[in-house]
Amino acid sequence: MNDRLWGDLVASVKVQKRSEDKETLTFGIDITEGDTKTNHTVEVDKPYYEKLTGGRVTAEELVEKSFMFLLKRESKESILRRFNLKKISYYFPEYENEIKNYF
């Protein structure tokens, strides 16, 4: 879990692995900010995880940092409730290059 300052509010990002199969990992993400909370489900294709991280960090860390990336650009309420991690680069073309800098 990670807390980040956003003005005078703190956002807490909690990532939990829900399932895993041969090709995909699925995570539940809870974002709490003040007294409000949103829940999200994210699928991560294993080859995409490897592409972004080279295995240097866990998939949970990739998802957490990806949500931090999103929260710098939009409110938690604006983040899709369910999506594949690849979808981020559709909305934010800089995502893949910037996320690699987190690691």
Image (spheres, grey):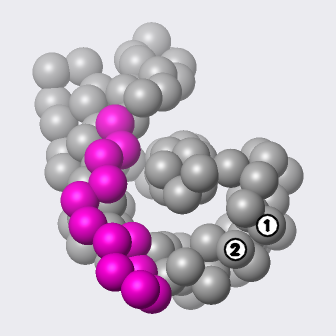
- Per the image, the residue denoted by label 1 is 54
Residue type at mark 1: give it.
Gly
- Per the image, the residue denoted by label 2 is 50
Q: Quadrant of the N terminus?
A: top left
Horizontal and vertical percent position of residue 46: 55, 79
For residue 52, side relative to residue 8 (left or right)? right
Q: Eyeballing the image, is 68 above or below 66?
A: above
Which residue is at the front of the view, 55 or 34? 55
Q: Are marks 2 and 1 in contact (CB under 8 Å)?
A: yes
Q: Eyeballing the image, is 48 above or below 69?
A: below
Stretch of the chain drawn in magenta: 14-25
Residue found at x 23% / y 59%: 18
Residue type at mark 2: give it.
Glu
Q: Quarter of the image holding residue 14?
A: top left
Q: Is label 1 in a helix, a strand or a loop? A: loop
Horizontal and vertical percent position of residue 4: 52, 24
For residue 44, side relative to residue 41 (left or right)? right
Crowd rating for badge 2 (residues with CA inside 10 Å; few <14, some 14–19, many 20+): some
